[in-house]
């Protein structure tokens, strides 16, 4: 999905993101080792086998990443989500969250609203699409590039009725350059990396047959 000149590369990235986030039918198989934000979702009721062999986040014995979480509020929220959907796994979620962060930003910078529509909820999509439209109307083109996602932490989690929400803090280094229609740099510097901090909230209906996590909120800081 990462928008580049070669269509073949773009197609490869699209497939990669879908393997991380799931897809809108929930029927396509995933590679056994694929990191994905929904983990394994073999049971539409979200109450699959909870044995250690089916849980990739097991550390030792029956202890999981969730059990070892030191923040009581987060641990309780994770347990609530796991109870609603036994396939929920933090490790695979975080792998998918990183992929989503990088690829959604790339789509936004390139003005790919079709991709944004697929992975954003209505309100977030309207914000992103509006910014794309304004940028295009002003004749501006961004040439941004993520150098590295240096830090990722879950800073909030909750289960509201049957909807799981996880908020992730991303710290990243990127090159941010904006050019006008004549190719002149109007903002940024190709030589200087900048640090950005974003907080993104992803949500998923734990009882849905669709394994998709959707971006429902963003904020800086």
Image (cartoon, rainbow, N blue to C red):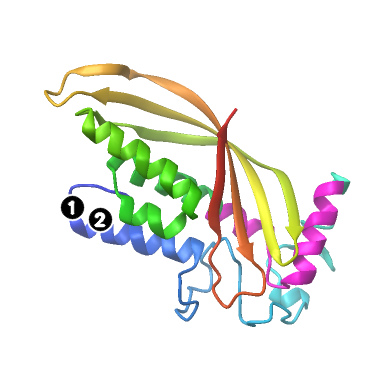
SS category of the residue bearing label 2: helix
Residue at horizontal 77 percent and vertical 74 percent from the top = 52
Residue at horizontal 72 percent and vertical 45 percent from the top = 156
Principal SS element in the magenta part? helix
SS category of the residue bearing label 1: loop
Left or right of residue 195, residue 136 in this image: left
The image quarter in which residue 197 lies: top right
Left or right of residue 63, residue 43 in this image: left
Q: Position of residue 30 (x, y in %)?
A: 48, 74
Contact between labelled residues 2 and 1, with CB atoms less than 8 Å apart: yes
Q: Position of residue 18 (x, y in %)?
A: 43, 64
Per the image, the residue denoted by label 1 is: 6
Left or right of residue 89, residue 38 in this image: left
User: 10 Å neighbourhood of mark 2: few (<14), some, or many (≥20)?
Assistant: few
Residue at horizontal 25 percent and vertical 16 percent from the top = 186
Distance from label 1 to label 2 (Cα)? 5 Å
Relative to 190, say whether 147 is above or below: below
Per the image, the residue denoted by label 2 is: 9
Instruction: Pick out the residue farthest to the left.
Output: 182
Residue 16 covered by magenta stretch:
no
Residue at horizontal 36 percent and vertical 44 percent from the top = 129
Q: Quadrant of the N terminus?
A: bottom left
Q: Quadrant of the C terminus?
A: top right
The image quarter in which residue 141 lies: top left
Query: Could you tell me if residue 185 is visible in this image?
Result: yes
């Amino acid at each position: 999905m990462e928008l580049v000149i070669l269509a073949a590369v773009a197609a490869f990235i699209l497939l990669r993101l879908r393997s991380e986030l799931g897809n809108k039918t929930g029927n396509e198989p995933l590679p056994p080792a694929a990191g994905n934000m929904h983990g394994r979702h073999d049971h539409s009721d979200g109450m699959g086998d909870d044995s250690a062999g089916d849980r990739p986040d097991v550390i030792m014995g029956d202890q999981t990443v969730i059990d070892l979480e030191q923040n009581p509020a987060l641990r309780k929220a994770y347990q609530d989500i796991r109870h609603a959907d036994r396939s929920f796994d933090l490790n695979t979620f975080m792998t998918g969250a990183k992929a989503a962060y990088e690829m959604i930003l790339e789509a936004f910078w390139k003005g790919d609203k079709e991709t944004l529509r697929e992975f954003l909820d209505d309100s977030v999509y309207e914000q992103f699409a509006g910014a794309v439209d304004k940028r295009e109307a002003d004749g501006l083109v961004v040439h941004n590039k993520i150098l590295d996602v240096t830090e990722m932490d879950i800073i909030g989690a909750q289960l509201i009725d049957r909807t799981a929400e996880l908020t992730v803090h991303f710290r990243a280094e990127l090159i941010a350059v904006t050019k006008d229609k004549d190719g002149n740099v109007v903002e940024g510097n190709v030589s200087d990396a900048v640090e950005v901090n974003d907080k993104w909230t992803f949500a998923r209906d734990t009882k849905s047959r669709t394994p998709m996590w959707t971006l429902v909120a963003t904020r800086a800081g």
